[in-house]
Image (tube, rainbow, N blue to C red):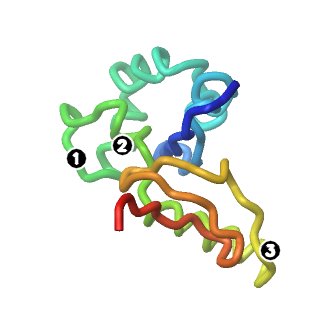
Amino acid sequence: MKNQIDTIYILENPEKNIIKFATGYQLKYDDIIKDVFGVACLNDLEMMIQFNKPFQDSICTNKEINVNKISLTTILRIASKTELLQLRNELLEEVGNLPIPRPFDSVIKLQEGIFHWDETNSTYISEKLGA
């Protein structure tokens, strides 16, 4: 039933110092928004961005931006390869030198494109189209 490539997002709550990765599925159907931001859904998160002054201040301080530059994509965006490598390094610290478990589907989408899991190196590698 699930034939799409899952996009990986990064959610950042600077007020509570929380950074989490999530799939598009988790954003729609799990409680990841509630776990990270304390609100039930994306619509509530947009309201929080607009009206919660301490939350706004924490974003401005963390991102070094003006309040009028805050948007949903400031705190919830498609993850980059660099950010995913940081997750890999954290997982390596937890499990040692053993192969780390695959954190997401075998094929994922990041800012830079489509990546697939390489069991040998326990990392996602870019799928190069063409030769």
Q: CA distance from mark 1 to mark 2?
A: 8 Å
> Height in image: 67 above or below 8?
above
Label 2 sits on residue: 59
Label 3 sits on residue: 95
Label 1 sits on residue: 65
Give coordinates of residue 95: x percent, y percent.
80, 74
Camera-side residue: 111 or 55? 111
Marks counted in the figure total 3
Give coordinates of residue 107: x percent, y percent.
59, 51
Circles 1 and 2: CB distance less than 8 Å? yes
Q: Quadrant of the N terminus?
A: top right
Per the image, label 1 sits on a secondary structure element best described as loop
Q: Which amino acid lies under the numbered mark 1 shown in the image of this protein?
A: Ile
What residue is shown at x 60% (from left), y 19% (from top)? 40
Mark 3 vs mark 2: give the one in front.
3
> Height in image: 131 above or below 52?
below
List the single residue furthest toward the bottom: 97
Please tell me which of labels 3 and 1 falls first in the chain.
1
Camera-side residue: 131 or 110? 131
Q: Quadrant of the C terminus?
A: bottom left
